[in-house]
C-alpha cells in the first residue's frame, strides 16, 4: 500500500482482457492509434482491469470489482481473460484483505467489466462477494442497468447487482457524494449517463480514479478520442474538458482502469497541447 497523509491506496488487478480495437478507439483511424497501442493480427488490444483498494477514515474501500469469478469457460475465452497472478481476490489477499474485510464498494458504473466481481457463486447461488460491504452506485446508473436497451443488454447483467438489492447492501446515490474526508464520488457523464469517477484528496495532493471517462491515458490526452462504448459521446467530450482543466490546475494523479501500459499519470499542457506523463509512484513518494 502507498500512503499519502492519512490516505492509503493500492492498484489491484482483476487481470487483463483482449478486445477488438474498434471498441476502445471507436472512430479513431488505425493509422493514428496503432502508434500508441498496436493491435494483433486479429485486431485485438489488451485492456487491464485495474481496481483500486483504498483505506480512509478506518474503512477499507474497493473501487470497482472487475469481471469477477462467475464467468464460464466460453465467456473467459470471449474476453481473452488472462490472470497469471490470480484475480482480484488473490490480489486483495496479497494486501492482507479478505472479502469480509471490505466495508465499502464504489462502482463507477455497472458495465460487466467494472462490477462483475460484485457477486460470486456459492452453492449455485449468486451472493455478494463482499458480505459485509455496502455497495454504492448512482441511482440513474442502477435504473438504466435494470432496464437495458438493445445496445446495453450485452453488458448490464442483473446478477451483478440484484443480489445486493435483495440483501439490502446496495446504496443508490443522487449525484456527487462525499464518502470520507479523503474520497468523493463525482458524476462524470458520457460513457454512461450517470457514470461516476472517484476523487481522492489528502492535504494538497489530489487524484482521480478516471474509470471510463477515459479508458486509456491517451483518451484523456486527446479530447476527441472516444470509445465506441460511450453512450453520450459529446457529453463525454464536455466532461473530459472540465476534468482536463481541473487535473492540470491541481497537478492531480490520474488513475486509469484499462490502460495496459500507464496506470497512473499526470496531464500537462505545453504550447497549447495536452500531454500525459506517467507517474513513478515510489520515487514521488520517497523523493
Image (spheres, rainbow, N blue to C red):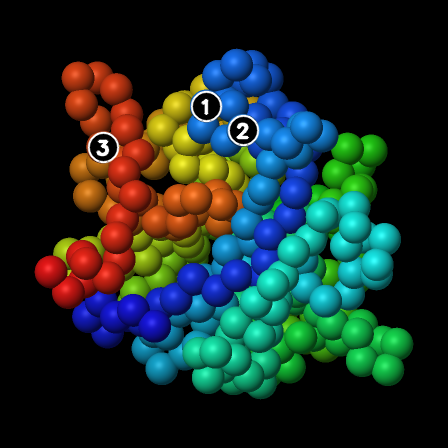
Q: Nearer the viewer, mark 3 or mark 1?
A: 1
Q: Which residue is mark 1?
A: 35
Q: Which residue is mark 2?
A: 38
Q: Residues within 10 Å of mark 3 (few under 14, many from 20)?
A: some
Question: Circle 3 is placed at which residue position?
Answer: 268
Quadrant position of residue 230: top right
Say what secondary structure mark 2 lies in. Answer: loop
Residue 167 picture quarter: bottom right
- Residue 199 drawn at (x, y percent): 36, 53
Is residue 63 visible in the rendered image? The answer is no
Contact, CB < 8 Å: mark 1 with mark 2?
yes
Report the residue that reaches farthest toward the right: 124
Residue ID at (36%, 82%): 58
What residue lies at 57% left-to-right and 26% top-to-bottom?
25
- Quadrant of the frame with the C terminus: bottom left
Give percent across and percent down for residue 105. 54, 68
Question: Horizontal and vertical percent for residue 136?
Answer: 55, 63
Residues marked 3 and 1 touching at CB (< 8 Å): no
Looking at the image, is mark 2 or mark 3 earlier in the sequence? 2
Circle nearer the N terminus (3, 1): 1
Amino acid at each position: 500500500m502507498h500512503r499519502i497523509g492519512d490516505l492509503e491506496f493500492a492498484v489491484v488487478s482483476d487481470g487483463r482482457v483482449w478486445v477488438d480495437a474498434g471498441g476502445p478507439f471507436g472512430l479513431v483511424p488505425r493509422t493514428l492509434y496503432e502508434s500508441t497501442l498496436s493491435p494483433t493480427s486479429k485486431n485485438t488490444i489488451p485492456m487491464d482491469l485495474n481496481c483500486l483498494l483504498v483505506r480512509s477514515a478506518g474503512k477499507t474501500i474497493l473501487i470497482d470489482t472487475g469481471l469477477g469469478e462467475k464467468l464460464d469457460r466460453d465467456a473467459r475465452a470471449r474476453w481473452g481473460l488472462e490472470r497469471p497472478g490470480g484475480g482480484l481476490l488473490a490480489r486483495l489477499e496479497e494486501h492482507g484483505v479478505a472479502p469480509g474485510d471490505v466495508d465499502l464498494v464504489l462502482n463507477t458504473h455497472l458495465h460487466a467489466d467494472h462490477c462483475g466481481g460484485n457477486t460470486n457463486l456459492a452453492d449455485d447461488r449468486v451472493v455478494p462477494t463482499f458480505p459485509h460491504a455496502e455497495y454504492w452506485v448512482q441511482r440513474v446508473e442502477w435504473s438504466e442497468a435494470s432496464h437495458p436497451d438493445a445496445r446495453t443488454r450485452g453488458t448490464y447483467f442483473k446478477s451483478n447487482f440484484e443480489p445486493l438489492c435483495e440483501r439490502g447492501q446496495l446504496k443508490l446515490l443522487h449525484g456527487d457524494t462525499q464518502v470520507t474526508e479523503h474520497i468523493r464520488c463525482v458524476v462524470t457523464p458520457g460513457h454512461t449517463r450517470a457514470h461516476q469517477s472517484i476523487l481522492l484528496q489528502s492535504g494538497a495532493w489530489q487524484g482521480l480514479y478516471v474509470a471510463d471517462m477515459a479508458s486509456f491515458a491517451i483518451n484523456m490526452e486527446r479530447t476527441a478520442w472516444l470509445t465506441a462504448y460511450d453512450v453520450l459521446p459529446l457529453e463525454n467530450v464536455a466532461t473530459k474538458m472540465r476534468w482536463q482543466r481541473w487535473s492540470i490546475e491541481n497537478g492531480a494523479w490520474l488513475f486509469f482502469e484499462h490502460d495496459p501500459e500507464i496506470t497512473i499519470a499526470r496531464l500537462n499542457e505545453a504550447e497549447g497541447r495536452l500531454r500525459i506523463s506517467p507517474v513513478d509512484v515510489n520515487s514521488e513518494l520517497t523523493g
